Amino acid sequence: MSHKATCTAPSNIAFVKYWGARDLDRVVPENPSISMTLRSCVTRTTVEHSDEGGDDIVLWRPESVDDDAPLVLEEPPPSFAERVHRHLDHLRRRFGIEGRLRVATANSFPAAAGIASSASGFAALTLAVSAAVGERLDVATASTLARESGSGSASRSVVGGYVQWPAAWPSDDAVPVADEEQGGSGGGFAVQLAGADHWDLRDVIAVVETGAKETSSLDGHRRARTSPYFAERLLRLPRRLNTVRKAIETRDFSTLGPEIESEAIDLHCMAMTSTPPIYYWRPGTLEVLAAVRSLRADGVPAFSTLDAGANVHVICEPHHEEAVVARLDAIDCVRRVLRDGVGPGPAASGEHLF
Ligand code: DP6
């Protein structure tokens, strides 16, 4: 007997970044983060659960290809396979799963393009395994389980629209509330601040680097506290979280834009001043950041943000998307421009990968 399920889960772009963990093993973040769930950059994952014996099998399609092209699944690199098997073991223990799991996963976007593929990947894996073994999850449980993959940002990818993780946090203090109030597992879960239809924001992604980054986010979290700016940032963060939440609530782009751009610069200042330092930026990153400033000087309100990588996400309102795309496309070291925007979150799908 076997049962197969497929789920898609989107990536997300953080407006307020998760950087540094109180407990990295349990993925308990130092601070709450806020993100926008994307629509087009998604991971599709199929899981088949069968009562036959044998080891779990994991395959992936590393690159996005034309939808009509035949699907070729390959063995993933060992570092990725190891993370997936670890999460499968975790879900196995959590749900008491016996038998074999076959997993296939494919991204709609280029691998290692600075788009959070672990966020979408571990969200999709969590949801597809749960569906294949007949577990119906509420959103908080799905978010907690996705977080327990080790990818904190995955906790936000099971929710659509504008999202905060952890859900609860005192607004006037950077200390988390008791674990029990957050679902009892330490790092809590994500909640929706507003749905995708609340505010149509676009994310134009300038890909300047397609290779894998030298330092993982995991190592970044480990080193975060060594930056002299880390403690200072935590003090300023409650104000920033309130400002970003309020700007989303009132659709106030002229407040949101500068705040998220400044937040991304703070993240990279911390990375560059940690021990040992982490330089995610490439020459193309600086060119895109300058292009975004020049767009603004020309009257186009667009603001940049970056996760732990070299590629730049340019956030704008729909009527400015074409101008942003045209300006980024004209930059020599931009290898490709991806268009995305806020999306409704994960979905079950009948289109299996095998
Ligand atoms: C800079 O530990 O969630 O993107 O597992 O690689 O996705 P991955 O990273 P994770 O850290 C994310 C760090 C960040 C900021 C953010 O998304 O909040």
Image (cartoon, rainbow, N blue to C red):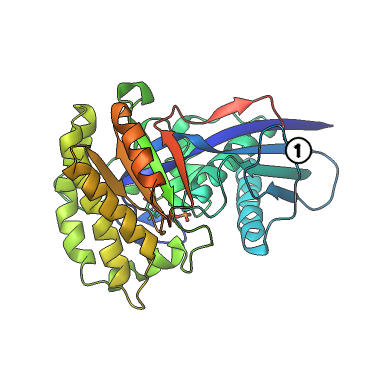
Q: Provide the secondary structure element on which disc 1 rests.
A: strand
Q: Position of residue 108 (x, y in %)?
A: 58, 39
Q: Looking at the picture, tell me which residue is in the foreground, 45 or 74.
A: 74
Q: Residue furthest top?
A: 197
Quadrant the N terminus occupies = top right
Q: Looking at the picture, tell me which residue is in the foreground, 46 or 113.
A: 113
Q: Residue, x 50% and y 34% (percent of image)? A: 40
Quadrant the C terminus occupies = top right
Q: Position of residue 132 (x, y in %)?
A: 69, 33
* Residue type marked 1: His
33 sits to left or right of 156? left
Ligand 1 under 8 Å from disc 1 Cβ: no
State ligand 1's quadrant: bottom left
Q: Which residue is mark 1?
A: 49
The answer to which image quadrant residue 198 occupies is top left
Could you tell me how many numbered marks the image carries?
Answer: 1
- Residue 251: tell me if it is visible: yes
- Residue 166: tell me if it is visible: no
The answer to which image quadrant residue 208 occupies is bottom left
Q: Is residue 278 above or below residue 146?
A: below
Q: Position of residue 30 (x, y in %)?
A: 30, 57
Q: Residue furthest bottom?
A: 276
Q: Is residue 239 above or below residue 69?
A: below
Q: Position of residue 21 (x, y in %)?
A: 36, 60
Q: Residue, x 47% and y 30% (percent of image)? A: 345
Q: Looking at the picture, tell me which residue is in the foreground, 307 or 45.
A: 307
183 sits to left or right of 305? right
